[in-house]
Amino acid sequence: MEKGKIVALEDRIPKLKEQRRRKANRRLVFLLIMFFAMISIIAYIQSPLSRVKSIHVVGNDIYSDQEIIRKSGLTRKTNIWKVKQQELIAKLKQLSEVKNAEITIQWPNTVTIKVKEHKRIAYLKKEQFYYPIMENGKVITDKKTSSIPINSPILFEFKEGAALKEMTNSLQSLPNEIVNSISEIHFTPSKTDPYHISLFMNDGFEVSATLRSFSDKMKHYPAIISQLNHNKKGIIDLEVGSYFKAFETEDEEKEVN
């Protein structure tokens, strides 16, 4: 062996002992950290700090914050570790006007409920009250108001069913500017047309139509009235073709292309 390459065993033993001691110390420190971390987690889970402190609700219009929270089942006694998002979403979707929901947890103890409700399309007039009509054709009977709505068409003589569903589908397919120009829609079925409707427009014109072709023909309403004398109001008949009858001389009929 070359000079300087030989290390006596008695010189190596102290170094080996020191290395083993350091490894043992590191292992002990790691185990102590894990032990105290587990104790801290258990203590946190069992303490009031792990309970839901704040519940925020966003996106709701039909339902109040309290109604949404009550349906979710969340309380300030709920352990935040036990909040199961998919179960809460399933509960909220049991509300007829909740289209979807999203649950977000912000640690350490805040829950945000974001709901997406069905869109309000119109109002149904019954006696002296107005009831919201949603995009799915449902009438919200427990959200009535006595104030006259100014931002949605008001429907008369409709009931939940095929005709109302067809009406809401038609309104959803129309541009907003046309929907906003409608004041009232009356369901006026006849023997020859069980889907007949009569509209009263904000500009003073009336429209006679059938639900079967209403959405397709009503899209042309701006072009139709652009050809008419706005000082001479009357009825625009969209049932077969497009015709105009002035109120003063209803025997006078004009075809509108």
Image (cartoon, rainbow, N blue to C red):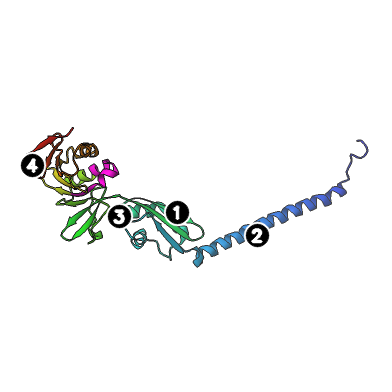
Element assignment for label 3: loop
> Disc 2 designates what residue?
32
Q: Quadrant of the C terminus?
A: top left
Mark 1 nearby-residue class (10 Å; few <14, some 14–19, many ≥20): few
Please name which of the two marks, 4 or 2, marks the residue nearer to the observer: 4
Mark 4 to mark 1 CA distance (whole Å): 62 Å
Q: Is residue 2 above or below residue 204?
A: above
Q: Quadrant of the N terminus?
A: top right
Task: Give me the residue at 12% from left, 42% from top.
Answer: 246
User: Would residue 81 appear left or right of 136 to someone viewing this image?
Assistant: right
Q: Is residue 249 above or below residue 79?
A: above
Please name which of the two marks, 2 or 3, marks the residue nearer to the observer: 3
Mark 3 nearby-residue class (10 Å; few <14, some 14–19, many ≥20): some
Dot placed on the residue nearer the N-terminal end, 3 or 4? 3
Start-end of magenta stretch = 169-184
Dot placed on the residue nearer the N-terminal end, 4 or 1? 1
> Disc 4 designates what residue?
250
Q: How many marks?
A: 4
Q: Residue furthest top?
A: 257
112 or 158: which is nearer to us? 158
Q: Are marks 2 and 3 in contact (CB under 8 Å)?
A: no
Mark 2 to mark 3 CA distance (whole Å): 50 Å
Element assignment for label 4: loop
Q: Amino acid at mark 3?
A: Leu
> Disc 3 designates what residue?
95
